[in-house]
Image (spheres, rainbow, N blue to C red):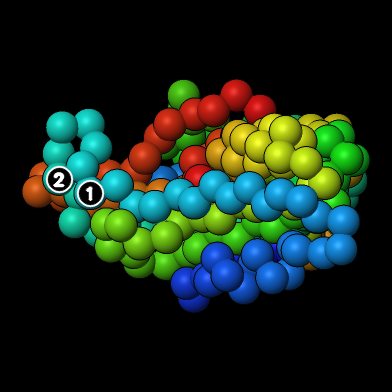
Amino acid sequence: MMRIEVKYYAWIREKIGEREMLEADDGATVREIVEKLREKHAELAGENFLIAVNGRTVDLNTCLKDGDLVAVFPPAGGG
Amino acid sequence: MIRVTEKDFSIDEVASILKGKEVGAVVFFLGVVKGFREGEDVSEMIVEAYREAAEAELEKIRSEALERFGIIDAAIIHRVGRLKPAENIVLVAASARNRAEAFEACSWMINKVKARAPIWKKENTARGWRWVRETVKP
């Protein structure tokens, strides 16, 4: 098993909290983590969000490593 | 020049960085906090960023603009933290030999900042705080 830290931003953070630790099978993909998060947090239903791993945006097939930091954040809204 | 900062910026400082021997035009876009939006007075705004990713995205937008429009230099500064109406939020600037490409690059960059940078705004109205959930297509 590996441990992944998940950090939330903006209105997603207000619904779920700032951060949490998740356990996942070795070699789990970003897609599997997203599925796990959607199962765990009903608040994510209908939310469109993006994922970055260690500060870089990634695709859903990316494999995660123990200790990775996964950021979950809404689409851009600055400017 | 890229910056995500709590501090206000100086347009003169950015102009002096962007000017150079071959530069004939510097175009700026300055975004400020609106004091009235969607029918309500706004008393304050909080700008939040996923800082590391926002800085990387702004740098990417700047590099793409340099290549795409053949401009000489560009700057993007985005503020974060608590801001009052009329305070500066964002500055985008492009310097070029001629004004046409500087205008085009500046307009392109602010659209990309709004569509791609992981930065969000929350505003305070008489009915409480609300997130600004405008979406701009990348």
Does residue A53 appear anywhere in the picture?
no
Q: What is the quadrant of the N terminus of chain B in the image?
A: bottom right
Which residue is farthest left?
B126
Based on the displayed image, in which of its 4 quarters is residue B113 positioned?
top right
Question: Which SS class for mark 1?
Answer: loop
Q: Amino acid at mark 1?
A: Gly
Q: Position of residue A48 (x, y in %)?
A: 54, 29
Q: Is residue B44 above or below residue B36?
A: below
Which of these two is toward me, B6 or A59? B6
Which of these two is toward me, B46 or A19? B46
Q: Circle 2 sits on which residue?
A: B41
Q: Is residue B124 above or below residue B12?
A: above
Q: Position of residue B137 (x, y in %)?
A: 60, 24
Please determine if labels 1 and 2 lie on a single subunit: yes
Residue at 49 percent across and 41 percent down: it is A77
Cβ–Cβ under 8 Å for marks 1 and 2: yes
Q: Amino acid at mark 2?
A: Asp
Q: Chain of mark 2?
A: B
Query: Which mark, residue B60?
Result: none
Q: What is the quadrant of the C terminus of chain B in the image?
A: top right
Q: Is residue B100 left or right of residue B11?
A: right
Residue at 53 percent across and 71 percent down: it is B10
Q: Is residue B42 left or right of residue A44?
A: left
Q: Chain of mark 1?
A: B
3D distance between C-alphas at marks 1 and 2: 6 Å
Q: Position of residue A51 (x, y in %)?
A: 68, 42
Q: Circle 1 sits on which residue?
A: B35
Question: Which SS class for mark 2?
Answer: strand
